[in-house]
Image (cartoon, helix red, strand yellow):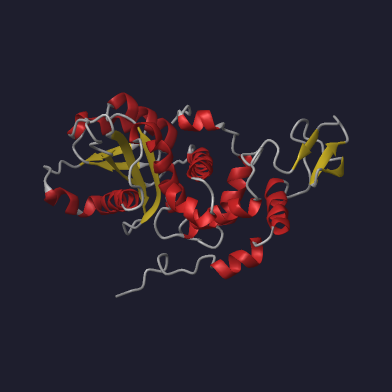
């Protein structure tokens, strides 16, 4: 049996992680490099001329053009954090290098913080992942399917009418040999109107979409994409069809990752972030050694979200 090179590739080991990011000074240097790879840029006017000074143990930069002052973390999701940067970096290491997803409860135990802090940290990181992936576009051969997350909660309904069951659409680009390359998920109803929105946002006109017999997927042709409709007939045999191997494997891995990691969460409120987390990790699985640094870049450029906004899920899908 041939070894799966993606699955068995070396990642960023814990000894290597602590060598690179084991102190606050190393974390600050990495953060500065990610935020200003070519040197300081004023977040207010874009100027490069600056002076710097220290105040309260923190370094500040003052723009030579507009006199705006900023710190390394101001205007980023690290702003106002009470956690050392080394804890943030350890959280990023755990979230990117673990084979399965890591829950807020596990982060609480590994980081030695309160559950509220771990939850907020994880959701800030997942929101940054979502923002980074929101313009993902798939071309070539693309398998698509409708799916659901969630189900019964204590005292609630079961089945499709469950208050905690969330509909979403999944799509995966494949190689000519049928191997998955990149994926995209969107929390949405399974209607033609919503599939048309998905197509406009996430499919290239050159894509060839392969789907089952659900009629809503014909809306992918609105952008000029080709649509190959295969009526599967339902049942267990339908998931074994070679034409849908990539998408069925992807959905199986997604549901296993979520059900095997999270005891429970409000799917209706937060499914878009958990889908984005899986999508972000999946689409960067070919180079596990670089994913932490790429996530750091995503974090410093992500919009700042308050705890209230994160908890009430006031973000567009």
Question: Residue at 34% of width from left, 58% of height from top?
Answer: 179
Q: How many marks?
A: 0
Task: Please indicate whether residue 185 sits to the left or right of residue 251 in the image.
Answer: right
Q: Position of residue 40 (x, y in %)?
A: 79, 44
Decide: is 47 above or below 287.
above
Q: Outermost residue toward the top?
A: 193
Q: Position of residue 295 (x, y in %)?
A: 56, 50
Task: Please indicate whether residue 118 sits to the left or right of residue 56 in the image.
Answer: left
Question: Residue at 37% of width from left, 41% of height from top?
Answer: 207
Residue 12: name its quadrant: bottom right
Q: Position of residue 298 (x, y in %)?
A: 58, 45
Is residue 90 in sight in this rendering? yes
Is residue 223 in sight in this rendering? no
Decide: is 94 above or below 227.
below
Q: Quadrant of the N terminus?
A: bottom left
Q: Quadrant of the C terminus?
A: top left
Residue 228: name its quadrant: top left
Question: Residue at 45% of width from left, 52% of height from top?
Answer: 281
């Amino acid at each position: 049996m041939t070894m799966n090179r993606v699955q068995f590739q070396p990642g960023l080991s814990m000894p290597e992680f602590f060598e690179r990011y084991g102190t606050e000074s190393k974390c600050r240097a990495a953060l500065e490099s990610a935020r200003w790879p070519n040197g300081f840029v004023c977040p207010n006017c874009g100027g490069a001329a600056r002076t710097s000074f220290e105040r309260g143990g923190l370094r500040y930069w003052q723009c030579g053009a507009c006199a705006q002052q900023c710190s390394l973390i101001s205007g980023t999701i690290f702003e106002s954090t009470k956690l050392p940067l080394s804890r943030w970096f350890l959280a990023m290491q755990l979230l990117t290098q673990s084979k399965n997803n890591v829950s807020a409860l596990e982060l609480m135990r590994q980081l030695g913080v309160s559950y509220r802090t771990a939850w907020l940290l994880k959701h800030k990181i997942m929101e940054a992942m979502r923002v980074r992936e929101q313009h993902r576009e798939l071309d070539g051969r693309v398998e698509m399917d409708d799916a659901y997350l969630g189900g019964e909660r204590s005292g609630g309904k079961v089945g499709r009418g469950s208050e905690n069951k969330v509909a979403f659409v999944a799509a995966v680009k494949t190689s000519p040999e049928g191997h998955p390359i990149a994926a995209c998920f969107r929390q949405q109803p399974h209607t033609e109107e919503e599939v048309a929105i998905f197509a406009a946002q996430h499919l290239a006109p050159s894509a060839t979409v392969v789907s089952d017999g659900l009629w809503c997927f014909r809306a992918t042709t609105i952008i000029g994409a080709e649509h190959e409709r295969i009526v599967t007939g339902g049942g267990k045999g339908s998931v074994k069809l070679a034409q849908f191997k990539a998408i069925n494997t992807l959905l199986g891995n997604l549901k296993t990752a979520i059900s095997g990691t999270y005891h429970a969460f409000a799917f209706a409120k937060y499914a878009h972030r958990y889908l984005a987390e899986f999508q972000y990790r999946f689409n960067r699985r070919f180079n596990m050694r670089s994913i932490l640094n790429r996530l750091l870049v995503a974090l410093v450029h992500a919009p700042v979200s308050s705890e209230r906004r994160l908890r009430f899920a006031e973000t567009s899908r």
